[in-house]
């Protein structure tokens, strides 16, 4: 019994298009660099969320740190999510 090629070709074309698009995007994105000043600023943040507002500027910080361990003596990971944000509005 012959295999129906239309469904197989559709799936292959879809996955091929996704693979080609992923390859093209990864070729265009430049490799980032690590700025130690920014790393130190992120490490100095307090846990939780803070908002500050001044004339023409609003700033926010957020930090979420948790340790997850499998069992009492099992392997574990530490998750640290930190974000800084700033919005500046100037009248021209």
Image: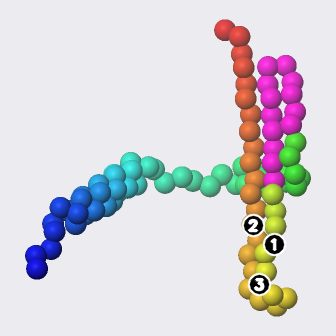
Our reading of the magenta stretch's main secondary structure is strand
- In percent of width and height, residue 57 lies at 79, 25
Frontmost of labels 2 and 3 is 3
User: For mark 3, what is the residue?
Assistant: 70
Q: Quadrant of residue 4?
A: bottom left
- In percent of width and height, residue 73 lies at 82, 91
Element type where label 1 sits in the image: strand
Left or right relative to 18: residue 70: right
User: For mark 2, what is the residue?
Assistant: 79
Identify whether 17 is placed above or below 51: below
What colour scheme governs how the chains and residues are painted in the rendered image of this protein?
rainbow
Q: Residue 67 has which mark?
A: 1
Q: Among all residues in the image, which is located at the extreme bottom?
A: 73
Q: Which residues are magenta?
A: 51-63
Q: Among all residues in the image, which is located at the extreme left?
A: 2
In the image, residue 81 lies in the stretch drawn in magenta = no
Q: Nearer the viewer, residue 73 or 87?
A: 73
- In percent of width and height, residue 19 lies at 33, 59
Left or right relative to 13: residue 46: right
Q: Nearer the viewer, residue 70 or 8?
A: 8
| Residue drawn at 71 percent across, 10 percent down | 91
Element type where label 3 sits in the image: loop
First in sequence: mark 2 vs mark 3: 3
- In percent of width and height, residue 71 lies at 81, 87
For residue 72, say whether it is visible.
yes
Frontmost of labels 3 and 1 is 3
First in sequence: mark 2 vs mark 1: 1
Disc 2 from disc 3: Cα separation: 14 Å
């Amino acid at each position: 019994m012959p295999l129906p090629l239309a469904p197989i070709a559709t799936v292959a074309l879809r996955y091929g298009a996704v693979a080609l698009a992923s390859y093209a995007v990864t070729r265009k994105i430049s490799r980032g660099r690590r700025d130690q000043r920014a790393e130190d600023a992120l490490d100095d943040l307090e846990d939780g969320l803070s908002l500050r507002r001044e004339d023409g500027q609003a700033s926010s910080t957020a930090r979420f740190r948790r340790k997850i361990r499998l069992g009492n003596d099992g392997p574990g990971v530490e998750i640290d999510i930190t974000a800084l944000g700033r919005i500046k509005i100037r009248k021209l």
